[in-house]
Image (tube, rainbow, N blue to C red):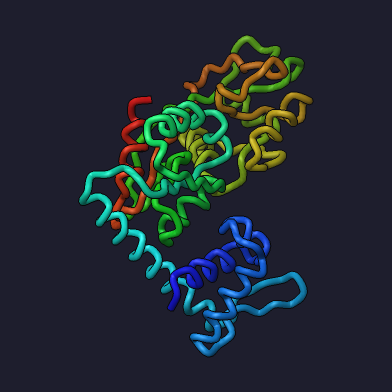
Amino acid sequence: MDSLALKAFVVVAEQRSFSRAADQLFLTQPAVSKRIVKLEEQLKTRLFDRIGRTVSLTMAGQHLLPKARVILQAMEDSANELTNLSGRVGGTLRIATSHHISLHRLPAPLRLFIARYPQVELDIQFAESEVIYEGLLQGRWQLGIITLNPNPHPHIEQQVIWQDQMQFVAAPDHPLSLQSAVDLNQLSSFPALLSKSNTFTRDIVEARFAAHQLALNVAMSTNNLDTIRMMVSIGMGWSVLPETLINQDLNIIASQAKPIVRQLGCVWHQQRSLSNATVAFMDLLRGS
Protein backbone atom coordinates (compact mmCIF):
# COMPACT_ATOMS: atom_id res chain seq x y z
CA MET A 1 0.00 0.00 0.00
CA ASP A 2 1.15 3.51 -0.85
CA SER A 3 1.89 5.56 2.28
CA LEU A 4 0.62 8.74 0.60
CA ALA A 5 -2.68 7.04 -0.16
CA LEU A 6 -2.89 5.75 3.41
CA LYS A 7 -2.24 9.25 4.74
CA ALA A 8 -4.99 10.66 2.52
CA PHE A 9 -7.35 7.94 3.73
CA VAL A 10 -6.69 8.72 7.40
CA VAL A 11 -7.11 12.48 6.95
CA VAL A 12 -10.36 12.11 4.97
CA ALA A 13 -11.66 9.75 7.66
CA GLU A 14 -10.77 12.21 10.41
CA GLN A 15 -12.09 15.28 8.61
CA ARG A 16 -15.12 13.49 7.13
CA SER A 17 -14.60 15.68 4.11
CA PHE A 18 -12.50 15.48 0.95
CA SER A 19 -12.24 19.27 0.69
CA ARG A 20 -11.07 19.74 4.29
CA ALA A 21 -8.64 16.85 3.87
CA ALA A 22 -7.27 18.49 0.73
CA ASP A 23 -6.69 21.73 2.65
CA GLN A 24 -4.86 19.90 5.43
CA LEU A 25 -2.71 17.93 2.98
CA PHE A 26 -2.04 20.97 0.76
CA LEU A 27 -3.44 19.09 -2.23
CA THR A 28 -6.29 19.64 -4.65
CA GLN A 29 -9.49 17.76 -3.96
CA PRO A 30 -9.15 15.70 -7.18
CA ALA A 31 -5.65 14.65 -6.07
CA VAL A 32 -7.01 13.40 -2.75
CA SER A 33 -9.84 11.57 -4.49
CA LYS A 34 -7.35 9.94 -6.86
CA ARG A 35 -5.31 8.60 -3.94
CA ILE A 36 -8.40 7.18 -2.28
CA VAL A 37 -9.54 5.52 -5.51
CA LYS A 38 -6.07 4.02 -5.94
CA LEU A 39 -6.17 2.60 -2.41
CA GLU A 40 -9.66 1.20 -2.92
CA GLU A 41 -8.53 -0.47 -6.14
CA GLN A 42 -5.53 -2.01 -4.38
CA LEU A 43 -7.69 -3.34 -1.57
CA LYS A 44 -10.55 -4.27 -3.90
CA THR A 45 -13.13 -2.70 -1.60
CA ARG A 46 -14.89 0.62 -1.07
CA LEU A 47 -13.60 2.55 1.97
CA PHE A 48 -16.02 5.48 2.01
CA ASP A 49 -19.72 5.97 1.43
CA ARG A 50 -20.33 9.25 -0.37
CA ILE A 51 -23.91 10.51 -0.16
CA GLY A 52 -24.15 14.11 -1.31
CA ARG A 53 -21.59 16.04 0.71
CA THR A 54 -21.58 13.46 3.50
CA VAL A 55 -18.55 11.18 3.75
CA SER A 56 -18.56 8.20 6.10
CA LEU A 57 -16.44 5.09 6.49
CA THR A 58 -17.72 1.75 5.26
CA MET A 59 -17.24 -1.29 7.47
CA ALA A 60 -14.00 -2.02 5.59
CA GLY A 61 -12.88 1.57 6.16
CA GLN A 62 -13.61 1.34 9.87
CA HIS A 63 -11.51 -1.82 10.03
CA LEU A 64 -8.62 -0.24 8.14
CA LEU A 65 -8.45 3.10 9.99
CA PRO A 66 -6.71 2.01 13.24
CA LYS A 67 -4.31 -0.19 11.27
CA ALA A 68 -3.49 2.65 8.88
CA ARG A 69 -2.68 4.90 11.83
CA VAL A 70 -0.33 2.26 13.26
CA ILE A 71 1.44 1.86 9.89
CA LEU A 72 1.90 5.61 9.42
CA GLN A 73 3.06 6.04 13.01
CA ALA A 74 5.63 3.25 12.60
CA MET A 75 6.93 4.83 9.39
CA GLU A 76 7.25 8.27 11.00
CA ASP A 77 8.93 6.83 14.09
CA SER A 78 11.41 4.89 11.96
CA ALA A 79 12.28 8.01 9.98
CA ASN A 80 12.73 9.94 13.23
CA GLU A 81 15.02 7.27 14.68
CA LEU A 82 17.23 7.28 11.58
CA THR A 83 17.40 11.08 11.54
CA ASN A 84 18.14 11.15 15.26
CA LEU A 85 21.22 8.97 14.72
CA SER A 86 22.85 11.84 12.85
CA GLY A 87 22.07 14.32 15.63
CA ARG A 88 20.70 16.68 12.99
CA VAL A 89 17.70 18.88 13.80
CA GLY A 90 15.65 18.86 10.62
CA GLY A 91 12.58 17.48 8.94
CA THR A 92 9.11 18.52 10.02
CA LEU A 93 7.96 19.59 13.48
CA ARG A 94 4.38 18.36 13.83
CA ILE A 95 2.50 19.68 16.81
CA ALA A 96 -1.12 20.08 17.81
CA THR A 97 -2.23 22.87 20.11
CA SER A 98 -5.27 24.78 21.28
CA HIS A 99 -6.18 28.17 19.86
CA HIS A 100 -5.78 29.82 23.27
CA ILE A 101 -2.23 28.54 23.74
CA SER A 102 -1.30 29.34 20.14
CA LEU A 103 -2.38 32.96 20.66
CA HIS A 104 -1.15 33.63 24.18
CA ARG A 105 1.82 31.31 24.78
CA LEU A 106 3.44 30.10 21.56
CA PRO A 107 4.28 33.17 19.42
CA ALA A 108 7.57 33.99 21.17
CA PRO A 109 8.86 30.37 21.39
CA LEU A 110 7.89 29.69 17.78
CA ARG A 111 9.63 32.85 16.59
CA LEU A 112 12.81 31.81 18.40
CA PHE A 113 12.60 28.23 17.10
CA ILE A 114 12.19 29.38 13.49
CA ALA A 115 15.20 31.67 13.83
CA ARG A 116 17.32 28.96 15.43
CA TYR A 117 16.26 26.08 13.15
CA PRO A 118 15.25 27.58 9.78
CA GLN A 119 15.67 24.18 8.12
CA VAL A 120 12.74 22.69 10.08
CA GLU A 121 9.29 22.81 8.50
CA LEU A 122 6.35 23.52 10.81
CA ASP A 123 3.07 21.59 10.68
CA ILE A 124 0.73 22.98 13.34
CA GLN A 125 -2.79 21.64 13.81
CA PHE A 126 -5.38 23.35 16.01
CA ALA A 127 -7.99 21.59 18.13
CA GLU A 128 -9.39 21.51 21.63
CA SER A 129 -7.08 20.08 24.28
CA GLU A 130 -9.28 17.03 24.87
CA VAL A 131 -9.38 16.21 21.14
CA ILE A 132 -5.60 16.48 20.95
CA TYR A 133 -5.21 14.24 23.98
CA GLU A 134 -7.39 11.56 22.40
CA GLY A 135 -5.52 11.99 19.13
CA LEU A 136 -2.22 11.28 20.87
CA LEU A 137 -3.64 8.02 22.19
CA GLN A 138 -4.65 7.12 18.63
CA GLY A 139 -1.25 8.05 17.20
CA ARG A 140 -2.51 11.06 15.21
CA TRP A 141 0.06 13.49 16.59
CA GLN A 142 3.56 13.29 17.98
CA LEU A 143 3.37 16.25 20.36
CA GLY A 144 0.53 18.22 21.88
CA ILE A 145 0.76 21.57 23.66
CA ILE A 146 -2.43 21.82 25.65
CA THR A 147 -4.19 22.30 28.95
CA LEU A 148 -2.92 19.29 30.87
CA ASN A 149 -5.27 16.53 31.92
CA PRO A 150 -5.79 16.60 35.71
CA ASN A 151 -6.29 12.81 35.49
CA PRO A 152 -3.59 11.71 33.01
CA HIS A 153 -3.73 8.47 31.04
CA PRO A 154 -0.93 6.02 31.97
CA HIS A 155 0.34 5.92 28.36
CA ILE A 156 0.60 9.69 28.00
CA GLU A 157 3.62 11.60 29.28
CA GLN A 158 3.11 15.23 30.18
CA GLN A 159 5.36 18.06 31.26
CA VAL A 160 4.25 21.34 32.77
CA ILE A 161 5.53 24.41 30.92
CA TRP A 162 3.25 27.19 32.19
CA GLN A 163 1.14 27.73 35.30
CA ASP A 164 -1.98 29.45 33.96
CA GLN A 165 -3.49 31.43 36.82
CA MET A 166 -7.22 31.98 36.48
CA GLN A 167 -9.47 34.50 38.18
CA PHE A 168 -13.14 34.63 39.11
CA VAL A 169 -14.61 37.43 36.98
CA ALA A 170 -17.90 39.20 36.40
CA ALA A 171 -19.19 42.38 34.78
CA PRO A 172 -18.35 45.54 36.79
CA ASP A 173 -22.04 46.03 37.70
CA HIS A 174 -22.71 42.37 38.56
CA PRO A 175 -23.83 41.80 42.20
CA LEU A 176 -20.70 39.72 42.86
CA SER A 177 -18.49 42.62 41.77
CA LEU A 178 -20.13 44.91 44.30
CA GLN A 179 -19.26 42.74 47.29
CA SER A 180 -16.08 43.18 49.30
CA ALA A 181 -15.47 39.46 49.74
CA VAL A 182 -17.08 36.46 48.03
CA ASP A 183 -16.75 32.78 48.92
CA LEU A 184 -17.42 29.67 46.83
CA ASN A 185 -20.86 29.20 48.37
CA GLN A 186 -21.91 32.65 47.14
CA LEU A 187 -20.45 32.00 43.70
CA SER A 188 -22.38 28.74 43.41
CA SER A 189 -25.67 30.59 43.95
CA PHE A 190 -25.19 32.76 40.83
CA PRO A 191 -25.30 31.61 37.17
CA ALA A 192 -21.89 30.63 35.81
CA LEU A 193 -20.55 30.64 32.25
CA LEU A 194 -17.99 27.87 31.87
CA SER A 195 -16.25 25.54 29.46
CA LYS A 196 -18.24 22.48 28.40
CA SER A 197 -18.56 19.40 30.57
CA ASN A 198 -15.75 16.83 30.40
CA THR A 199 -13.15 19.39 29.37
CA PHE A 200 -9.96 19.61 31.40
CA THR A 201 -10.64 23.21 32.45
CA ARG A 202 -14.22 22.43 33.51
CA ASP A 203 -12.98 19.38 35.46
CA ILE A 204 -10.52 21.58 37.37
CA VAL A 205 -13.20 24.15 38.27
CA GLU A 206 -15.79 21.52 39.24
CA ALA A 207 -13.25 19.73 41.43
CA ARG A 208 -12.65 22.93 43.41
CA PHE A 209 -16.35 23.34 44.17
CA ALA A 210 -16.93 19.62 44.74
CA ALA A 211 -14.21 19.65 47.40
CA HIS A 212 -16.53 21.95 49.37
CA GLN A 213 -19.66 19.90 48.55
CA LEU A 214 -20.93 22.65 46.26
CA ALA A 215 -22.66 22.32 42.89
CA LEU A 216 -22.25 24.85 40.11
CA ASN A 217 -25.19 26.72 38.61
CA VAL A 218 -24.10 26.62 34.96
CA ALA A 219 -26.21 28.89 32.77
CA MET A 220 -24.21 28.36 29.57
CA SER A 221 -21.20 26.36 28.45
CA THR A 222 -18.90 26.80 25.47
CA ASN A 223 -15.26 26.07 24.79
CA ASN A 224 -14.72 29.45 23.16
CA LEU A 225 -13.17 31.55 25.92
CA ASP A 226 -13.62 34.78 23.96
CA THR A 227 -17.36 34.07 23.81
CA ILE A 228 -17.43 33.45 27.56
CA ARG A 229 -15.57 36.72 28.13
CA MET A 230 -18.11 38.64 26.05
CA MET A 231 -21.10 37.00 27.77
CA VAL A 232 -19.64 37.77 31.20
CA SER A 233 -19.00 41.40 30.20
CA ILE A 234 -22.70 41.95 29.44
CA GLY A 235 -23.77 40.55 32.80
CA MET A 236 -24.98 37.05 31.92
CA GLY A 237 -23.04 35.47 34.78
CA TRP A 238 -19.63 34.98 36.34
CA SER A 239 -16.80 32.81 35.08
CA VAL A 240 -13.24 31.66 35.68
CA LEU A 241 -10.86 32.95 33.00
CA PRO A 242 -7.08 33.00 32.46
CA GLU A 243 -5.47 36.28 33.46
CA THR A 244 -4.29 36.68 29.85
CA LEU A 245 -7.93 37.13 28.76
CA ILE A 246 -9.07 39.61 31.38
CA ASN A 247 -9.65 43.13 30.02
CA GLN A 248 -11.26 46.39 31.12
CA ASP A 249 -14.75 44.99 30.47
CA LEU A 250 -14.36 42.49 33.32
CA ASN A 251 -13.97 42.84 37.05
CA ILE A 252 -11.92 40.40 39.11
CA ILE A 253 -14.20 39.26 41.92
CA ALA A 254 -12.80 39.84 45.40
CA SER A 255 -12.93 36.16 46.23
CA GLN A 256 -11.89 34.57 49.50
CA ALA A 257 -11.19 31.37 47.57
CA LYS A 258 -7.71 30.38 46.53
CA PRO A 259 -7.09 31.22 42.82
CA ILE A 260 -7.56 28.34 40.40
CA VAL A 261 -4.45 27.38 38.46
CA ARG A 262 -4.49 25.13 35.43
CA GLN A 263 -1.31 23.65 34.02
CA LEU A 264 -0.35 24.05 30.37
CA GLY A 265 2.37 22.04 28.74
CA CYS A 266 3.58 19.26 26.47
CA VAL A 267 2.01 15.83 26.07
CA TRP A 268 3.20 12.85 24.06
CA HIS A 269 2.66 9.10 23.86
CA GLN A 270 5.31 7.22 25.81
CA GLN A 271 5.73 4.71 22.97
CA ARG A 272 6.41 7.31 20.29
CA SER A 273 9.92 8.12 19.09
CA LEU A 274 10.34 11.88 19.28
CA SER A 275 12.24 13.58 16.47
CA ASN A 276 15.25 15.79 17.16
CA ALA A 277 13.11 18.75 16.07
CA THR A 278 10.45 17.86 18.64
CA VAL A 279 13.01 17.44 21.42
CA ALA A 280 14.65 20.76 20.47
CA PHE A 281 11.30 22.56 20.59
CA MET A 282 10.45 21.04 23.97
CA ASP A 283 13.84 22.15 25.31
CA LEU A 284 13.15 25.65 24.04
CA LEU A 285 9.73 25.69 25.73
CA ARG A 286 11.25 24.61 29.04
CA GLY A 287 13.51 27.63 28.90
CA SER A 288 10.75 30.06 27.92
Give whichever of 129, 255 is nearer the camera: 129
Residue at figure coordinates x 44%, y 54% from the top left: 141
Residue 244, horizontal then vertical, whole percent: 57, 23
Whether residue 130 is situated above or below residue 218 in the rendered picture: below
Give whichever of 52, 156 is nearer the camera: 52
Whether residue 101 is situated above or below residue 32 in the rendered picture: above
Give whichever of 263, 260 is nearer the camera: 263
From this viewpoint, which residue is outermost toward the front?
119
Residue at figure coordinates x 43%, y 62% from the top left: 138
Residue 37, horizontal then vertical, whole percent: 59, 80
From this viewpoint, which residue is outermost toward the top?
180
Give whichever of 61, 130 is nearer the camera: 61
Residue at figure coordinates x 33%, y 26% from the top left: 287
Residue 210, horizontal then vertical, whole percent: 50, 38
Q: Quadrant of residue 79?
A: bottom left
Whether residue 219 is situated above or below residue 72 in the rendered picture: above
Q: How many marks?
A: 0
Q: Quadrant of residue 50?
A: bottom right
Residue at figure coordinates x 67%, y 27% from the top left: 238
User: Quarter holding the N terminus?
Assistant: bottom left
Residue 27, horizontal then vertical, whole percent: 60, 61
Whether residue 7 is situated above or below residue 226 in the rendered picture: below
